[in-house]
Amino acid sequence: MYITLRRYAGAGARADEIARKVESGLVPILKAAPGFRGYCAFASEDGDAASVSIFDDRSAATRANDAAHQWVQTEMRDLLPDPPEIFTGETDIAEVAREREQDAGSGQSLFVLIRKYSDLSLPPGWAQQNTVPVITGAPGFRGLYVAMAEGDSNRAAVVTLFDTRENAVRAHERIMEVIRDKGAAVAPTPPRVVMGGTIILATP
């Protein structure tokens, strides 16, 4: 799978208005695109607006991202005048909760916590052995996507989805303990954390 993260600095204060337009205009475009796997948007706790898009592969994501960019330029220029910070990459790890726990019905809200790393040096299998089990086994776990930045193997993003903020933060704190104990050389710089409750959640 292929993931695209966008962060619009300072746009969190307009999140409700942005969400209304995105849900009625952009979401149908994304859901109709070949290879669509999921989309969510949230107002981050530091005042930004952020989104996560997931597609089957890079080509599907690129086509959908081009369509999304055109729509934003046409329909959202007043609300999002500045270009976003963008992260893209192939997902090396993707896990979701069991179907009976992963109810993505209308009105569902999840809590998103994203860790962005800038200077990783991961030995093969390190994350699968040390951090993935902590996240997927945590209370309230709903989804995990790990992607290395396209063109830069030292940068990565870890997207986690939980049922509540409390569970998301608790799992994050445990992950940071594991990194301090076992992976100081693997991730010497603390990650940048972006988090917030979803205001849009779309699945195929």
Image (cartoon, grey):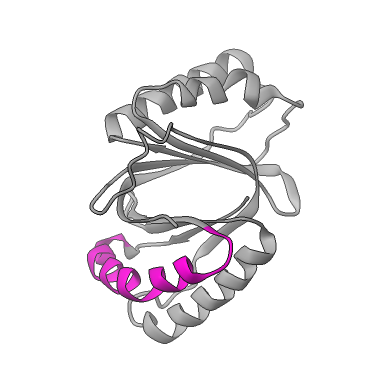
Between 166 and 99, the residue placed more toward the observer is 99
Residue at (58% x, 75% y) in the render: 66
Q: Residue at x 43, y 31 (%)?
A: 98
Q: Position of residue 9 (x, y in %)?
A: 41, 62
Number of numbered tags placed on the structure image: 0
**Is 184 or 61 nearer to us in this picture?**
61
Which residue appears farthest toward the front when viewing the image? Answer: 100
The quadrant of the image that shows the C terminus is bottom left
Residue 41 appears in which quarter of the rendering?
bottom left
Residue 101 quadrant: top left
The percent position of residue 179, horizontal first and vertical second, equals 57, 21
Residue located at (75% from left, 54% from top): 151
Residue bounds of the magenta highlight = 12-36
Task: Report x, y in % for residue 18.
Answer: 30, 70
Image check: 171 left or right of 188?
left
Question: Residue 80 appears in which quarter of the rendering?
Answer: bottom left
Q: Residue furthest top?
A: 181
Residue 32 lies within the magenta run: yes
Q: Main secondary structure of the magenta part?
A: helix
In the drawing, does residue 174 fall left or right of residue 200?
Answer: right
Residue 85: x and y, percent? 52, 62
In this rendered view, identify the residue nearer to me: 2 or 121.
Answer: 2
Q: Is residue 202 above or below residue 143?
A: below
Question: Does the segment drawn in magenta span residue 17?
Answer: yes
Task: Please state if 40 lies on the left or on the right of 178 as rendered.
Answer: left
Q: Residue at x 63, y 28 (%)?
A: 188
